[in-house]
Amino acid sequence: MNHCGLLTAKKEPVPLKSIEVELEVRDHVATVVSTLLYENKEDKPLEAVFVFPLPGDAAVCHFSAKIGQTQIVAEVKEKQKAHEEYDDALSSGQQAFLLEESDQSPDIFSLSVGSLPPGESASIRLEYVTELAVQADDGLRFCLPAVLNPRYQPQGSEGGSVQVTSVPASLVPYSLSFSARVFSPRPISKVESKCSLDPLQYLNTEKTQATVKLAAGHKFDRDVELLIYYKDAHQPTAVVEAGQASAKPGTLMGDPVVMLSLYPEFPQAVMSSVASCGEFVFLIDRSGSMDCPMDNSNQQETRIGSARDTLLLLLKSLPMGCYFNIYSFGSSYQHIFPKSVEYSEKTMEEALKKVEKMDADLGGTEILEPLKHIYSQPCIPSQPRQLFVFTDGEVGNTKEVINLVRDNSGSHRCFSFGIGEGASSALINGLAKEGGGHAQFITGTDRMQPKVMQSLRFALQPAVVDISVTWDLPKAVSVTVLSPPITTIFQGQRSLIYVQLTGQSPETAEGCVTVKYSLTGHPSQNQLRFSLKPAEDTGLTVHRLGARTLIRSLEMDIENEVEQDEGVKQKVVELSVQSGVSSSFTAFIAVNKDDSEAIQGPLLRRNVPAPRMMFASYCMMSCASLDICYADDSCEAEGYRLEECCDEGDEGDESEKVLQGSCPFDNSFEAAMPKQPRRDPLLQLVSLQKASGCWLLEPALAAALGKTSEEVENPQPSAVNKEVWATILALIWLHGFKSDVQDEWELLAMKAASWLCAQKAPCVTECVEAGNALLGCKVQKDSLGI
């Protein structure tokens, strides 16, 4: 195990020595500069290949290399030409560097460092820009993916899977340093992370500039996630960025580009109502990797266990009168009902019994086929379809999956959840973006439940229709919209729009954008006025993000055969070259054409290991307990084949034993694992709620409240029935003891309150007073919503 993927043929460390990352955040846009230091300690020239993740919507815009004192800046070229130039350089003994994105997923890049001479070092500089997503608590999320999970390539799919050499993160022999500078037009409230940070340092008295860095001793065993909080984060903004002086006016890079950040506000009357209809389809990942722990601590909660608890909350929170179904998938897929059924006590209980038995036992991660089956089911009239997808994102055919969701975007909204470190941001964000929904990531010690319940609240919001965006600009200025049309709007969620401005306007001129839409049959609009004077010190960040947005739209049109013309591909290549932003049809190529002697000798190829979670090691230690390792070869497909981790001189004997199912390890590891802790009291109480919203007065309820049956029954006012009394007690307990996680139970409590109001029960105030006395709480009747 000590030799897994770490050593060269001479037992020397792999050539990647360190990674240094500098982050600059301006408002809600980030520029990331990564410097990778390579060193060849072998006696032969080396070719190193490093496969690594980036945020799925990132725009890679700079790539350069420094060997000794020689600096080489890469150019963006058409991909085939870049490959030919790289191969020609290597065959002639020249140093060369090639950076390209995966054909299967836009968040996976491979870096080839070719012809690195013996004893030589190379410093690689990579720069990209990306938007920062808004979280439920208004924080802006930046994530530096440190973990690259092997991506499962479905059998029979076109194209080979990305070749990933992955090892336990604690054994990765290169270091990471990380620092960030934050600039904002509004005061910076705080910066948080699950990783240890040095104290936030403000650079001015207004607290609009600050720096922060990772604390010393950080282990490269998890994604580096920053949450940045501004005051008045929901204020709409417009950033006008001047064009590149050297670029031709009329081109994207030569004209000013505007980035608009809009936060539509819905009328309070609409927001206070919750839809009582809809078809809710839940799609749960049950591949072997879902048996991983939720985080790297010693806690035993697994991803699939958290998903089961979350499904309990979801099913209890659904409104009466809706329809639902639950699908699960791995190498194959299953469904609880042949088609979506009406939500009732009977169907809810039947679903929950099957949910309790769900394990991570379905092999690989083939999400495409269950999605096809779901979309083949006819929609139910007057029941808008809402699809919830839960996955750890280890999918190889990302583009194919996203295209399918996009093709069916008119029939549903898709809400996606990336579970655990290393989930593909391209997949999770792409599903939500193309499906008109919302994406959430659950990493580290995050609880899945509050994020999922927020998305359910979004799903219960009325759908916004007839969305239009109009511009009011000076006559001499014309607008070219770079972003795809807005297809979905949620209360409190940001909408970003990029536009190119062509023509001259006075610096004192103003522009105006108006977003109009219809909500529950009522027309609404939001408006923003902004100055056309370019902002200072923005570089070309907005231009590059605008170019990336347009490139992605054109690529999707090509993949969906909306545009058959070869000219569209050429337009993507030209736009990529002009803006210096990567695309699926281009690559960054750098060749050292120095006049020094050509490098002699055959090249040694080395794959630099990427960090991964501990699941593969767990699989090796206890593979007999995991169906994934021998049921259908999905272990090998998932990238957990031991042979690829072993030194070239090894025969991979242990690998063959795993794949044949005769693991040399027994189940003692599994047997030694501590027993699961007692069920969370909140989930215990929630599990007792009926589909209608009420609770029954039964011994199980008394136990959940921490009381005996007699203690619960004796204070009941004689004028009310048992169900009313039990439901009031449950609501008091939730408000009195679980107010810190109210976002998890708020919807099911609203359903309970609605049920109580419909009963028109007498003595409600007396019940609340008696319930407070029994449970030791001070909850007001009004706060219960009854």
Image (cartoon, rainbow, N blue to C red):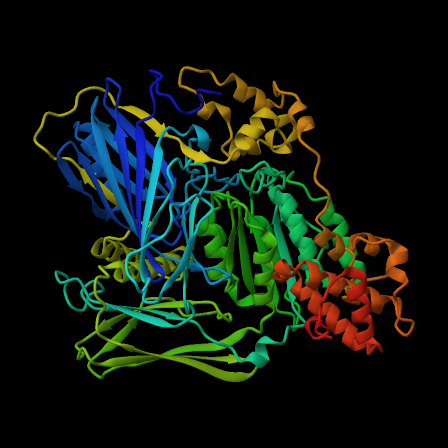
Which residue is situated farthest in the left direction here?
Answer: 595
Residue appearing at x 24%, y 61% in the figure? 538
Q: Quadrant of the C terminus?
A: bottom right
- Depth check: 50 or 526 in front? 526
Q: Position of residue 575 (x, y in %)?
A: 25, 58
Picture layout, residue 39 above or below residue 772: above
Q: Position of residue 398 (x, y in %)?
A: 46, 48
Going by the image, does 169 lie left or right of 244? right
In the rendered image, is residue 227 in sight?
no
In the rendered image, is residue 504 in sight?
yes
Residue appearing at x 83%, y 54% in the figure? 707
Picture layout, residue 464 above or below residue 146: below
Picture layout, residue 50 above or below residue 253: above
Which image quarter: residue 783? bottom right
Q: Position of residue 300 (x, y in %)?
A: 63, 38
- Depth check: 604 or 89 in front? 604
Q: How many marks?
A: 0
Which image quarter: residue 694? bottom right
Q: Position of residue 270 (x, y in %)?
A: 58, 79
Residue appearing at x 57%, y 54% in the figure? 389
Which image quarter: residue 570? bottom left
- Depth check: 766 or 580 in front? 766
